[in-house]
Amino acid sequence: MAAGALLPLVDRASWILQAAFLLAVQSGVGALARRVPLARALTVAAQALVTLALLTLVFAREHAFAGLIPGPDALRFFAGLLEQGGDDVSRYAIPAPLSDGIRLMLVGGVLVIGLLVDTLAVTFRGAAPAGLPLLALYSVAAGLSDDGIDWLWFLLAAAGYLMLLLAEGRDRLSQWGRVFGGAPGPGGDSPGAVAPVRTGRRIGAVALGIALVVPLGLPAMNGGLLDPTGAGAGSGAGGGGTISAVNPLVSLRDSLNRDEDRQVLSVRSELTDVSDLYLRIVSLDDFDGTTWKPSKRSITTVPDGSFPTPPGLGADTERTEIGTTVSTADWYAQDWLPMPYPPSGVSIRGNWRYEPVGMTLVGDHGQNTRGLTYEVRSLHVRPTAEQLADAPEPAPALRREYTELPDSLPAVVSRTAREVTEGATNAYDQAVKLQEYFTLTGGFEYDTEVDVGGDSQAIARFLRDRQGFCVHFSFAMASMARSLGIPARVAVGFAPGTPQADGTVAVGLRDAHAWPELYFEGVGWTRFEPTPTRGSTPSYTVEDTEESTVPDPARPSQTASSEPSAEPSASKGCTPERRRMGACESESPQAALPTGNDGPKWYALLGWALAGFAVLVLPLAPMLWRARTRAARLGGHGRSEAEAVPYVLAVWDELTDTAWDYGIAPDESLTPRGAADRIVRLGRLGPGAAASVHRVADAVEQVLYAPRPRPTTGLTDEVRGVAAGLRSSADRRARARAVFAPRSSVRVVWAVSAWWAGVRGRLSALRPDWRRPSRQRG
């Protein structure tokens, strides 16, 4: 049931049927092993071996002995398949295609979690800690899904866990028989469910209701689990909904970081000069000092007909409406729609929503760009340098929002901005000087190997080292512009691609790009290009463009001519021969937020999950073991004469271990009566608890020495009374140690030592005796 949370991660659900069948076989093996019965460790080992054989049969039978027994070839195949799955997870957006590698990760992960749950809940009879693996499974699904997990999957997982707890409770109650039940119904009907079971159901229902309903009334929780925006980008039916302030480009970033330059888009445009054909995906306008990300914005239905006029664009600014047709690759699944900015209309099929501030389209409830063809009408805005220089001050609210900088931003950023723009008389001159600082006068180098950095010093290091790629340049210029009072944000998308012979433009992975947008009243959000050798320098930032003899370092590597070419673009300084030999450095930019180099791999996530599980479980292992041991000792019947002896001795062991946990070490040399006197004296027990100790000791002597031992009832309550007396007479530190670090848990070490001694003894007995026979005669 908890594995259902993984269903939205892939576009086919057939894997869960396979996982359910294999999980049923795994659980059946465990049930048979416990019925034999086998030791607990052997039961778990048998289930693990059968699970490995099943995975081998399903995924690697051609590389195994008899299709079931994995050998070195099968293990190498598994390793390669897991590596392929990790690559596919990094390459594709959610929902990803169900490749063999992803299927192995899903099915294998469910089987591993299922084995952990079965081991904890059934083999070791501890349903409560079995919730940790279930929580890990749900958390992985929720963490990988950009839009979060639908509340239905949480409800299923929680219901399954409550059923597990209820089953364990009913099993333990059944060991005591029918202790008490509900009152007879009308007409003398038999009573209903046992009261504790009925109460447990009510508690479970109330807990689930609180978990689902209470967040709806808390504004800080953004609507809770029932919020309709949780299943996608928006509510889906009406005009409400929001886009959360999260990184929308995780999947795109992972695809862009690959060395392979695959074609992403095929574009046909009415634009004469395709060097200006930037395809914008999303704008990042929230800067917290370590990362730029999109703000949480309201979304609505896509407007019919023409879009509203872009913010800030005045009637005096020259513009031309152009049409662009975009076709996306079948493997490219992006939630945000690449479009020229500013769009004036979109014709597209599917479920899309419109974010009016950034003028972007975002997929709703799983909609993405995979294999789409759509048409965009957009405005090609051509401001003049004079219009930008004479732009009036923006509205105070807009200026306040888009010039906000965190206090953690190093002072060197604003200081460098003032030094670079010294002598500038207006915001436009300052922006041009910043652009020229990065592309011409600052001595910066374009280098994709530089780490993005994820702390508040990342921009300061970039200004010091002067090496980076588009993320560094755009983030730095936008931050410096804000420090000068110029509204700024960062756009992420694709730079102009490569013209083809058929008149289209091929946009590949290496065309992924990030650039700053600065706001000028009367023109609106205006593109600048601070990254050297990437994209194209806007004409309104270059004086006398047609007559200038100064080389433009910000022009793209391909020619800006609109004449089609059948040759693919080549990086500067990299010949086709060197490219075929693999000697060219990848120029693929990490068009993403500064969250690391390539993002965490699947094995890193698995390692952190296991480490977190160990951190949670290992400190609590003694407490869990004692709880399990206590439940086993006190849960016996002891009603028949055959059961009397083991039951009473188990109860006595629990009493002496409880006293040990509170500092009264057992003394094996004493009789039960002498040991009882010692516990009463050292534990400073009151009359009631002391009487309970002696009653248990009397029961022990009776079963040890009486000709026919008789069952004794009520011993469990006696032990609980003694435990309460020891707890009340101990100080706070002793009580905490008795719970979290019980001294009697050392019995585990003793048991392992005895088991190992027995194994060594059996191995020694099996070892042949090679000693030569004696030649002495008697």
Image (cartoon, rainbow, N blue to C red):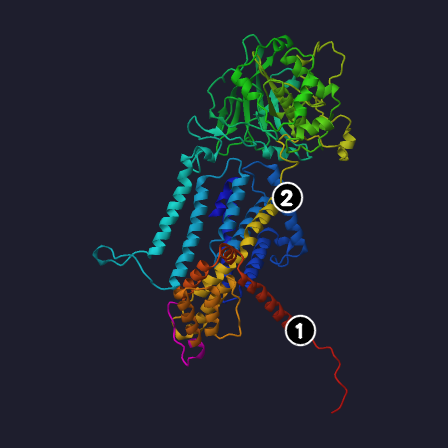
Residue 207 position by quadrant: top left
What secondary structure is the stretch in magenta mostly built from? loop
Q: Which residue is mark 1?
A: 764
User: Is the residue 25 above or below the residue 146 in the image?
Assistant: below
Q: Which residue lies at the image location 55% right of the left edge and 46% below the top edge?
A: 106
Is residue 119 among the parts visible in the rendering? no
First in sequence: mark 2 vs mark 1: 2
Q: Nearer the viewer, residue 28 or 38?
A: 38
Inspect the image, locate mark 1, and give the three-letter code of the amino acid beneath it. Answer: Ser
- Report helix, strand or loop for mark 2: helix
User: Is the residue 518 above or below the residue 625 in the image?
Assistant: above
Q: Nearer the viewer, residue 670 or 682?
A: 682
Q: Position of residue 458 (x, y in %)?
A: 66, 30
Q: Which mark is residue 84?
A: 2
Residue 518 position by quadrant: top right
Inspect the image, locate mark 2, and give the three-letter code of the amino acid beneath it. Answer: Gln
